[in-house]
Image (cartoon, rainbow, N blue to C red):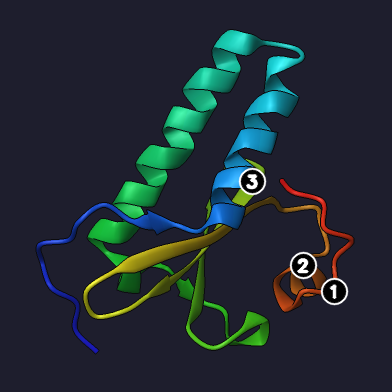
């Protein structure tokens, strides 16, 4: 599948937005300035993903069409359709990612 060159901004699911908020809150307890800059970095990485989604690893073990991109200790999970990239979750890499993405997690964000 080829993707169009002109991409719009990626769409973040409500869970992905909650993940970003939880990540920012967690970092802000130690360093509020870094929390803001790190969330900006994650959002910029989401835009880079939208610019070239096939350039990122396909993760069939996590679901149909799921791809991932690491950023620091976090992993951005997304699905690329012909006209849109949807950021599904943004999670710490040390978490039980298969369980969370399959819906078997306790519901914690981040």
Dot 3 or dot 1, earlier in sequence: 3
* Residue topped by disc 2: 100
Q: Residues within 10 Å of mark 1 (few under 14, many from 20)?
A: few
Q: Is residue 56 left or right of residue 64?
A: left
Q: Is residue 4 left or right of residue 61?
A: left
Residues 14 and 27: in front is 14
Residues 16 and 63: in front is 16
Report x, y in % for residue 63.
Answer: 61, 84
Question: What residue lies at 69% left-to-right and 36% top-to-bottom?
Answer: 22
Q: Residues within 10 Å of mark 2 (few under 14, many from 20)?
A: some
Q: Residues within 10 Å of mark 3 (few under 14, many from 20)?
A: many
Whether residues under marks 2 and 3 lie with C-beta atoms below 8 angstroms apart, the answer is no
Question: What residue lies at 50% left-to-right and 58% top-to-bottom?
Answer: 13
Give residue 29's quadrant in the image: top right
* Residue topped by disc 3: 19
How far apart in space, not on screen, are marks 2 and 3 (Cα)?
Answer: 12 Å
Note whether 64 is above or below 57 in the view shown.
below
Report x, y in % for residue 93.
Answer: 72, 53
Give residue 51's quadrant in the image: bottom left
């Amino acid at each position: 599948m080829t993707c169009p060159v002109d991409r719009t901004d990626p769409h973040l699911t409500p869970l992905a937005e909650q993940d970003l908020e939880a990540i920012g809150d967690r970092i802000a307890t130690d360093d509020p300035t870094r929390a803001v800059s790190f969330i900006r970095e994650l959002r910029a990485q989401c835009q880079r993903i939208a610019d070239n989604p096939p350039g990122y690893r396909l993760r069939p073990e996590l679901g149909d069409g799921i791809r991932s991109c690491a950023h620091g200790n976090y992993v951005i999970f997304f699905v690329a359709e012909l006209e849109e990239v949807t950021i599904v979750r943004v999670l710490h890499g040390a978490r039980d990612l298969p369980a969370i993405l399959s819906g078997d997690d306790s519901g914690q964000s981040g």
